[in-house]
Image (tube, grey):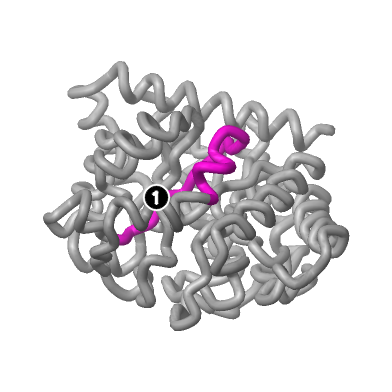
Amino acid sequence: MENNFSQLVIPRININSSESIEEARLLVKKFGFDSFILFATEKIKFGEDSKFRLDNLNMVRDILNLESKEEILFFIDAENGFGRRCSEGKEFDISDIESLDDKDKREIFDAINLELYKNKISFNLAPVLDIKKEDSDVLKGRAFSGNPMVVSSIGKTFLDSTDKNNIIGCLKHFPGHGVISGDTHKELIRSDISEIDLEATHLKPFIELIKIADLVMINHINYTQYDRDLIPASMSYEIMTNILINQLGFSGVIISDSIRMEAITSNFKESKMIEAFVLNGGDLILDPLNPIKCLSELKEIYLRSPISIDRKINKVLGLKEKARRLILK
């Protein structure tokens, strides 16, 4: 499985940067990478409004596919539409979506996911299942509601839409970003929420939808009731293995939030983060600063835990196989 370590890494590609495009081409040609997350900038900042042009995306796809044995797969944050990243794409205001009737919700979500399908983008890193917190800038316009059951219902409608339109969705940001007001793009933040309150409120939408999900994203918040040291959820055995896998029974792919965020880079070496994420339950490493070095770290982990890494690779390969089947529908 040594040559397949790249299956566990999703690098960023900045569609507006010729340097980033060339780096991606070399990652495909020399190291076998076959999946990327789409951005229009190198910045790690929530609310970044840089966008790429559709013709540039199509050009990049052609360049990468020429070097790849498999169809290149793209991930994107299109919670409110392709227009969040692409200048020609549609973008919707979903800040008050809970007030819309079910038909209107379905129409918006179908428009979002159908546009991704038409542009051969396989993974939409949505829906956001975080509970709305009015003083949270990072969840503003993204979280569906402050009511967990409403979030579950709208989240289900979104996942139904991804399924209908041959897109693979992702539940995020487990186990709930609505516990804090701050922004993990900028810092590592502690939450002292009790286990009872977390389960009764913030975990509810995940519990409701976990059985129909292929992909779950882990956030970078430190939940002190589970990890008293300054350990984010994305490095936590308690959060990923004990809660998500063992208690909730999730058997799909666990993906990190971007590991370029300040919550990680200001507190941990990337190698330390990768080691903890993978050994404590995680599968897909999203947006590393150095994808090639990431492969070296995975090789070291493989020498200590080959069976675990082989299982992760096989699980991810299965998900990618599904994505490629859906592209052809």
Residue under the point 60% across and 55% down: 149
Residue under the point 34% across and 39% down: 243
Q: Does the magenta stretch include residue 207?
A: yes
* Residue 304 falls left or right of residue 70: left
Crowd around label 1: few <14 · some 14–19 · many ≥20 (10 Å): some
Q: Position of residue 35 (x, y in %)?
A: 55, 43
Q: Position of residue 101 (x, y in %)?
A: 83, 65
Q: Would residue 21 be visible to someone looking at this image?
A: no
Q: In which quarter of the image is residue 110?
A: bottom right
Residue under the point 31% across and 44% down: 239
Residue under the point 49% across and 50% down: 204
Viewer-nearest residue: 259 or 11: 259
Q: Residue furthest top?
A: 307
Quadrant where the image shows the C terminus: top right
To which residue does mark 1 refer? 199
Q: Quadrant of residue 1?
A: top left
Q: Would residue 142 be visible to someone looking at this image?
A: yes
Q: What residue type is labelled 1?
A: Glu
Over which residues does the magenta segment extend? 205-221
